[in-house]
Amino acid sequence: MTAVFVTGTGTDVGKTFIACGVIQALRTSGRSVDALKPVVSGFDPAKADESDPGRLLAALGRTITAPEIERMSPWRFAAPLSPDLAAGREGRSIDFAAVRDFCRRAIAAREGTLLIEGVGGTMVPLDPPRTVLDLMVDLSIPVILVAGSYLGSISHTLSALDVLARRGLKVAALVVSETAGASVSLEDTVASIGQFTGPTRIVPLPRLADASFDHPAFARLAEQF
């Protein structure tokens, strides 16, 4: 497996953090890796180093410059909204075919592992009537699904797994990332989800106070690429 799509059950569940951790683990093991985040909402050029593409570039060991941001994330929007709404705020729209072809070219040209990070959750709209799910189906590469451990996450996670399976997508791993202040423990969340997921690999990730990428969960994820 040399190309994988990183998606989430919703926004702010830790997709970029997980992607960065996998990148670091691959680099530590001497593997070649690259990453893309084609579509970004809530992007502020003045704070590029704090943005998702900025964090991915830092994990890759690359300088955070305007050309590098453009290479990684050609579709950038200022409003922190779903991409279709964020684009509309700027009088723009997202060309779904262009996003798909951009990703396909990167997959074809990859050297080593390529991570493609989605925007928001699995079914966030890109353009009427297509969503991130449609992009994943068109690319037809394995998926890392990232979930939280907040109350309600179990239903959100099982719903996402169901729709991915119905569309014929292979889930390489489900990462359950501990949500800060959640009323449900990470262990209970993983145990409950695991009763319904069959052979799907579940990787629990405790809340890391220092945002360290040294946790063995990242190495476990990187092993399969």
Image (cartoon, helix red, strand yellow):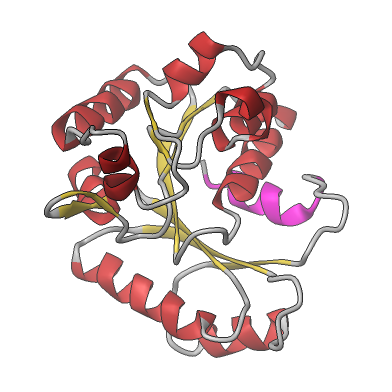
The answer to whether residue 216 is above or below residue 150 is above
Q: Residue at x 70, y 56 (%)?
A: 217
Q: Residue at x 31, y 41 (%)?
A: 89
The answer to whether residue 43 is above or below residue 196 is above
Q: Is residue 80 left or right of residue 150?
A: left
Q: What predominant SS class does the magenta segment belong to?
A: helix
x and y percent of residue 171 in the render?
39, 60
Q: Which one is nearer the viewer's eye here, 128 or 206?
A: 128
Q: Quadrant of the N terminus?
A: top left
x and y percent of residue 114 in the render?
45, 31
Q: Is residue 119 left or right of residue 22?
A: left
Q: Residue at x 49, y 41 (%)?
A: 42
Residue range in magenta is 214-224
Q: Residue at x 26, y 55 (%)?
A: 133
Magenta stretch encompasses residue 223: yes
Q: Is residue 29 left or right of residue 196?
A: right
Please tell me how many numbered marks the rendered image carries. 0
Q: Which one is nearer the viewer's eye here, 104 or 180?
A: 180
x and y percent of residue 207 in the render?
78, 64
Residue 198 visible somewhere in the drawing: no
Magenta stretch encompasses residue 193: no
The answer to whether residue 225 is above or below residue 114 is below
x and y percent of residue 167 in the render?
19, 63
Q: Quadrant of residue 159?
A: bottom left
Q: Quadrant of residue 49?
A: top right
Residue 134 visible somewhere in the drawing: yes
The answer to whether residue 93 is above or below residue 14 is above
Q: Is residue 213 left or right of residue 184?
A: right
